[in-house]
Image (cartoon, rainbow, N blue to C red):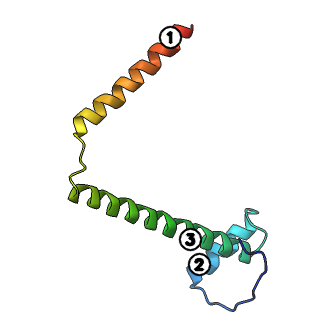
Amino acid sequence: MPTKSVQRSIRFTRYFDNLLRSKVKSGQYESVSEVVNEGLRLLDQRDQEKRDLRDMIELGCRQIDNGDLHDGEAVFEEIKQMGRDKRAKIRGRR
């Protein structure tokens, strides 16, 4: 993440100005800039998660189009069996 800072002049609604000030006043953050940077970092993270989700959906759609499907009940049964096997293995160690 870039460490060089750039100065900007921005306007906030009263609500967000009060929120910024309360975050700094609470001691959670040392400055308004720190609060804004954290908010932008979280926004960037959310945007990346949305892109990742879209990519997974597109992959799933392509798999469906190609007939690469799995029976849901069979998959869940396999997962349950893996859990049972793991529990049995753990019990065997006692």
Residue 37, x across and y down, in percent: 67, 73
Q: Residues within 10 Å of mark 1 (few under 14, many from 20)?
A: few
Q: Which residue is mark 1?
A: 91
**SS of the residue at dot 1?**
helix
Q: Which residue is mark 3?
A: 44
> What's the mark number on residue 11?
none
* The N terminus lies in quadrant: bottom right
For the point 60% across and 86% down, the residue is: 12
For the point 62% across and 69% down, the residue is: 41
Residue 92, x across and y down, in percent: 51, 8
Mark 1 and 3 residues: CB-CB less than 8 Å, in contact? no
- In this view, 63 is above or below 83: below
* The C terminus lies in quadrant: top right
When asked about the image quadrant of residue 29, the answer is bottom right
**SS of the residue at dot 2?**
helix
Dot 2 or dot 3, earlier in sequence? 2
> What's the mark number on residue 16?
2
User: Image check: 27 left or right of 68?
Assistant: right
- For marks 1 and 3, give the CA distance: 44 Å
The kind of residue on which mark 3 rests is: Asp
- Number of marks drawn: 3
Q: Residues within 10 Å of mark 2 (few under 14, many from 20)?
A: few
Q: Nearer the viewer, mark 2 or mark 3?
A: 3
User: Image check: 94 left or right of 22?
Assistant: left
The kind of residue on which mark 2 rests is: Phe
Dot 2 or dot 1, earlier in sequence? 2
The kind of residue on which mark 1 rests is: Arg
